[in-house]
């Protein structure tokens, strides 16, 4: 009888569960590059590796096997990944590293082309074969080579299959008190500059039941802030026919995630952001009044060229409705500068919009040409110097807006979540509900005694550039280390 794909998957799972040989297990270090979605993959990869009996090491220098989870979205990310791989190749040639396993988006994008640059790579694992990292790490499946005498290479580059990965059983890399929750994978929006659909595939989401179970596991592990992510969170449910959509999911998580104090939404898409979603954010107690809404541009011609399916007037109307329906909302956004054909006048229009609207936080990217995308094939590609100059000007305008917003907070009282001393020289750090980890400004505690993961009422007493200087409203004793 012919073996089906389901049979092959079942046999592969059985192989992963079988006891490992008596030889010393590999000591594995992991380098995680890219976005929060990649970080979730890294945590699940480490969970698979730990369950297999391998040793996980936080110190790369003592690891004999390194797994690199790559990002392939932008040229800068690919350059960073190749730099890391080149350094590891030097270690391998020096005899201090046994095995290099490369996983993630760059593998899915470039496949075996990576070997032209870094031939020391031992295994390639695509984004649709995440669980195969166990076999790659243990070097348990020897594949024949096409070239006589060449070193065997393990390839796990399977085709796309349309289920969202189950992300429970992760080996957490974030601080214990917050965690990322990937609600969906892939994207159907087809922006002309983006490679995500070709790498990650079309939108496919987890069921509400799966997400509730995952959130409960994370809360049991200490997470008090759950950060919902996906390439396009606002289209949640479109692939499965889940009629309540993102608004329904927010309401369910708000009702059933009693252990979480904050539920935060990231990566909302403007053309499909509905009033039902706004109302859910406004009405759900645990859902923070924070929206990450990447706009990319404001000029109509640029928005059309980018394939954003929204106009300036529609964008402005949406932003106005958000501010009215969600009192006190924090709006973060990102823009692309130097898109093909962007004129001086169109860029100046963007600058005026950023200055006048007053986003609470805004980031920018210099357009990265991806040849396989429609934008990559457009005429009028701009010089790097032009993109760099426009990026600097945009960030200076947003700096003025952000500094003014920070100063308006002086004297205000609010609640923060303590992240602890992160070792960057600024002392104890915290965040209010309008600050997401890693991407936004922070609050600087002017006194000790606050434990990591604790919620504290504070008053803002000063600013330090974008950051707020805060003081607990109640007197707190410093934490004295034990003997």
Image (tube, grey):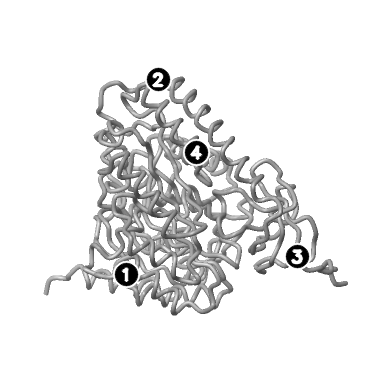
Residue 369 horizontal/vertical position (percent): 35, 31
Residue 157 horizontal/vertical position (percent): 30, 53
For residue 12, the mark is 1
Residue 358 horizontal/vertical position (percent): 51, 41
How far apart marks 1 and 4 lie (CA) works out to: 33 Å
382 vs 20, left or right, is left
Q: What residue did someone put label 2 on?
A: 383
> Observer-nearest residue: 437 or 27?
437
Select label 1 or label 4 by which is in front: 4
How far apart marks 1 and 3 lie (CA) works out to: 56 Å
Q: Is residue 460 above or below residue 110?
A: below
User: What is the crowding at mark 4: few (fewer than 14 residues within 10 Å), some, or many (at least 20)?
Assistant: some
How far apart marks 3 and 4 lie (CA) works out to: 43 Å
Residue 342 visible in the current orientation: yes
Residue 440 horizontal/vertical position (percent): 57, 49
> Which quadrant of the structure image shows residue 336?
top left
Q: Residue at x 32, y 44 (%)?
A: 109
Q: What residue did someone put label 3 on?
A: 473
Select label 2 or label 1 by which is in front: 2
Q: Secondary structure at mark 3?
A: loop
For residue 80, the mark is 4
How far apart marks 2 and 1 lie (CA) works out to: 49 Å
How far apart marks 3 and 2 lie (CA) works out to: 52 Å
> First in sequence: mark 3 or mark 4?
4
User: What is the crowding at mark 1: few (fewer than 14 residues within 10 Å), some, or many (at least 20)?
Assistant: some
Image quadrant in which the C terminus is located: bottom right
């Amino acid at each position: 009888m012919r073996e089906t794909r389901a049979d092959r998957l079942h046999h592969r799972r059985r192989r992963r569960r079988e006891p490992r040989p008596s030889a010393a297990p590999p000591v594995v270090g992991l380098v995680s590059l890219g976005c929060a979605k990649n970080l979730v993959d890294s945590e699940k990869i480490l969970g698979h590796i730990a369950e297999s009996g391998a040793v996980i090491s936080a110190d790369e220098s003592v690891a004999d096997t390194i797994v690199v989870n790559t990002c392939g979205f932008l040229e800068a990310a690919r350059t960073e990944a190749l730099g890391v791989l080149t350094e590891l190749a030097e270690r391998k040639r020096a005899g201090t590293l046994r095995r290099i396993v490369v996983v993630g988006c760059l593998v899915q994008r470039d496949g075996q082309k990576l070997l032209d640059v870094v031939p020391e790579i031992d295994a390639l694992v695509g984004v649709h074969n995440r669980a195969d990292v166990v076999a790659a790490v243990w070097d348990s499946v020897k594949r024949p080579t096409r070239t006589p005498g060449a070193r065997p290479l393990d390839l796990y580059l399977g085709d796309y299959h349309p289920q969202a990965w189950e992300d429970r059983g992760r080996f957490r890399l974030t601080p214990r008190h917050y965690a990322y929750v990937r609600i969906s994978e892939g994207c159907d929006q087809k922006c002309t500059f983006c490679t995500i659909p070709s790498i990650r595939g079309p939108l496919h989401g987890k069921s509400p039941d799966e997400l509730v179970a995952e959130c409960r596991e994370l809360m049991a592990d200490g997470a008090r802030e759950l950060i919902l992510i996906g390439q396009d969170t606002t289209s949640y449910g479109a692939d499965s026919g889940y009629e309540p959509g993102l608004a329904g999911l927010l309401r369910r998580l708000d009702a059933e995630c009693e252990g979480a104090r904050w539920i935060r939404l990231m990566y909302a898409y403007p053309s499909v952001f509905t009033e039902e979603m706004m109302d859910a954010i406004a009405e759900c107690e645990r859902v923070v009044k924070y929206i990450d809404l990447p706009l990319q541009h404001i000029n109509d011609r640029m928005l059309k060229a980018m394939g954003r399916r929204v106009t300036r007037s529609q964008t402005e109307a949406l932003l106005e409705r958000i501010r009215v329906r969600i009192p006190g909302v924090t709006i973060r956004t990102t823009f692309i500068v130097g898109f093909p054909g962007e004129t001086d006048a169109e860029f100046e229009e963007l600058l005026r919009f950023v200055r006048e609207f007053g986003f609470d936080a805004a980031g920018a990217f210099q357009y990265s040409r991806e040849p396989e995308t429609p934008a990559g094939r457009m005429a009028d590609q701009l010089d790097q110097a032009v993109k760099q100059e426009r990026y600097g000007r945009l960030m200076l305008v947003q700096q003025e807006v952000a500094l003014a917003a920070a100063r308006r907070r002086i004297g205000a009282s609010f609640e923060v979540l303590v992240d602890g001393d992160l070792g960057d020289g600024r002392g104890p750090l915290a965040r209010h509900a309008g600050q997401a980890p890693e991407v936004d400004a922070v609050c600087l505690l002017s006194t000790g005694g606050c434990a990591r993961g604790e919620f504290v009422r504070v008053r803002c007493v000063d600013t330090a550039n974008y950051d707020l200087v805060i003081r607990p409203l109640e007197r707190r004793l410093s934490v004295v280390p034990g003997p």
